[in-house]
Each structure stands twice: as structure tokens, then as C-alpha cells.
Image (cartoon, rainbow, N blue to C red):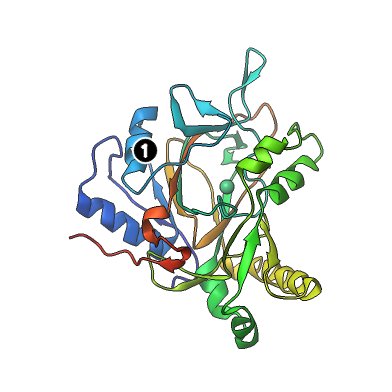
């Protein structure tokens, strides 16, 4: 595995249809590098959706939060306000997490298209940071590896939501009962076999992981804290500084990510996001039984 993450895919126009070979090569690159940047794109919302659909089914957020008009599969992430109305979700992902780990069908990839990137003194703000969870797994002690080898971890959507609500200036309301019921907690193996690489990753992110099942509560809490602290080590970090008009695609199984909130309300950021689900890469037993990806050509 790479010591860090990130690769740039140049001279690929994402507004054009991809061949099966191109799609498979990008999936292999995603497993290998974790984060792929596609610079200098010019995409309509429909083209972003079409590109994203090459890799799997797209997620539709329940409740219609921050959807692009006419495209429920495309979410707007933005701090911009027009006529008193927010254009998108303004504080999305501002803490370490893995999208959709709280769901029975997890997410394979995030695909973001950034058309407004805040800048200060010529430097881009609002970076997205990543941690390499293949490498974190490899470095775990044999003791932890054997303790957690057959364990599952419960992931709960509400943990991250409440963490974000507790922040100063948050306008997030508490989740209604209906919203909570729409996203009940889910269990996944602590060590998930990554369908793109066939290797194990630590699948335990600080945003959603709440309990290691089958251990006493105190031991579960202690090990989770240690796993969260481990992944914060500098050697696993990749910080992606955004370039305007780039598309960024990242592996949502082999990385955790964090949106850096270092820009103000007048420093505008605008992104469109599609979330590719991983259901087709796992068997009917869910994440217990990964189906390894095989390139089709
Ligand atoms: Fe996220």
C-alpha cells in the first residue's frame, strides 16, 4: 500500500461517457491511491451524475436535504446564501468520519465537484483531509488484531449529528424521531475486506463508530479511543488542497476524511456531491461477505 494517498488523473474529460475499461481502471486506481483528482472539468449536474453512476448506485438522502434542483442524487455542499436561503449544506463533514458507515449498505466512493473554492492571500481554503485505513490496519498490534478479528462495530448516524450540533454557531436541529428511524445503527466487521484491493482495512471512524460488539463496555470504549487516536498519526494523513473546477473522487471504505473549516461565511465554497454505494461489491450477507472486484477487460 502507498505510504500516503492521492493521485491525479489528467486529460480525462468527465463530461464524456467512460468505457468499461476506463471505469475499471479508475476503480483499481481508487483502491490503490484512495483519492483521485480530475482537474479542469466543466460539467453540468447531469454529467456529474452520469459520471458517478459508472461506479454504482447513487445515494439519495432521505428528506431531500440540500438536493440540486431536479437531481435528488446530487447534494449541494455550500456556505452560500441566496435571497436569505442557504444554497446547500454548510457544515458537512467537518470532523473525522466515513460517509454512510452507519448504514447497512455502505458507501464505496464520494465524488465532489468544486466550482467555488475559498481563497485567502492566494491560497485555497477548505481542504479535505484523508487517513489511510489500509495502512492503519497493517500497523495495528497483533494483540488488537486478534481481539477484534471476529468482532463487529456498531455505527450510529446520531453520534456525528450530535457532535456537529454541539459546535458553536451550528444551526442543525436535533434529529426528529422519523429521521432517527430512517437511519437505525448498523454493524460492520471491525476489519473489513476492501472489495477493490482484497486487503483488510480498519473500518472504525470517530464520527460514527460507537461500540465494539461482544466486549464489555469499558473495554470497547478503551479500544475505540485507541483506534481513533492511532489513525490521527501524521504518517496516515493526506491533505488535499482544492483546485477550482476539479472533481475529487475518494474511497469511502479505505479512508476516513475531514472537511477543514478554516474559511468564513463570506469566503464562498460551492460543491456538488454524488455518493456511490457499495452494495454491488458485497454479497447478500452485507459487509460480512465481500465480493472481490474483478476488472471486466
Ligand atoms: Fe463526509
Q: Which residue is more in the foreground, 266 or 68?
A: 68
- Report whether residue 44 is seen: no
Task: Give the vertical position of 70 relative to 294 (above or below).
Answer: above
Q: Residue at coordinates 57% horizontally, 67% vertically from top-left?
A: 236
Percent from the top left, x then y, of residue 294?
Answer: 27, 65
Extreme top residue here?
Answer: 83
Decide which of 141, 211 is in the foreground and name it: 211
Q: Label 1 neighbourhood size at 10 Å, few (<14), some (14-19), many (20+)?
A: some
Rendered view: 24 above or below 19: below
Q: Which residue is mark 1?
A: 40
Identify the residue at image location x=60%, y=74%.
151
Quadrant of the rendered structure where residue 279 is? bottom left
Residue at horizontal 32 percent and vertical 64 percent from the top: 293
Question: Where's the C terminus, which quadrant?
Answer: bottom left
Q: Position of residue 65 (x, y in %)?
A: 58, 30
Write down the quadrant of residue 66 in the picture: top right
Side of 166 relative to 280 (left or right): right
The quarter of the picture where the N terminus appears is bottom left
Counting from the top left corner in percent of width and height, residue 33 is at 42, 62
Q: Is residue 266 above or below residue 163?
A: above
Amino acid at each position: 500500500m502507498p505510504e500516503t494517498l492521492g493521485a491525479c488523473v489528467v486529460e480525462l474529460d468527465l463530461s464524456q461517457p467512460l468505457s468499461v475499461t476506463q471505469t475499471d481502471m479508475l476503480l483499481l486506481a481508487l483502491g490503490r491511491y484512495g483519492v483521485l483528482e480530475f482537474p479542469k472539468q466543466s460539467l453540468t449536474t447531469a454529467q456529474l451524475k452520469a459520471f458517478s453512476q459508472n461506479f454504482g448506485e447513487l445515494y439519495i438522502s432521505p428528506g431531500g436535504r440540500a438536493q440540486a434542483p431536479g437531481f435528488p442524487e446530487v447534494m449541494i455542499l455550500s456556505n452560500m446564501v441566496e435571497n436569505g436561503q442557504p444554497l446547500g449544506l454548510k457544515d458537512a463533514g467537518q470532523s473525522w468520519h466515513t460517509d454512510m458507515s452507519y448504514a447497512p449498505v455502505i458507501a464505496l466512493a464520494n465524488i465532489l465537484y468544486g466550482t467555488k473554492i475559498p481563497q485567502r492571500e492566494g491560497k485555497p481554503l477548505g481542504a479535505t483531509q484523508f487517513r489511510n485505513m489500509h495502512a492503519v490496519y497493517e500497523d495495528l498490534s497483533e494483540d488488537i488484531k486478534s481481539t477484534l478479528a471476529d468482532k463487529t462495530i456498531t455505527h450510529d448516524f446520531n453520534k456525528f449529528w450530535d457532535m456537529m450540533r454541539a459546535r458553536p454557531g451550528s444551526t442543525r436541529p436535533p434529529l426528529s424521531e422519523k429521521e432517527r428511524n430512517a437511519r437505525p445503527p448498523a454493524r460492520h466487521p471491525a476489519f473489513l475486506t476492501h472489495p477493490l484491493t482484497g486487503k483488510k482495512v480498519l473500518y472504525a471512524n470517530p464520527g460514527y463508530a460507537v461500540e465494539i460488539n461482544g466486549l464489555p463496555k469499558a473495554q470497547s470504549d478503551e479500544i475505540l479511543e485507541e483506534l481513533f487516536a492511532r489513525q490521527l498519526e501524521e504518517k496516515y494523513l493526506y491533505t488535499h488542497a482544492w483546485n477550482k473546477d476539479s472533481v475529487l473522487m475518494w474511497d469511502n471504505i479505505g479512508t476516513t476524511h475531514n472537511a477543514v473549516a478554516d474559511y468564513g461565511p463570506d469566503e464562498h465554497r460551492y460543491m456538488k456531491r454524488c455518493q456511490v454505494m457499495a452494495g454491488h461489491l458485497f454479497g447478500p450477507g452485507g459487509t460480512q461477505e465481500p465480493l472481490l472486484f474483478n476488472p471486466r477487460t
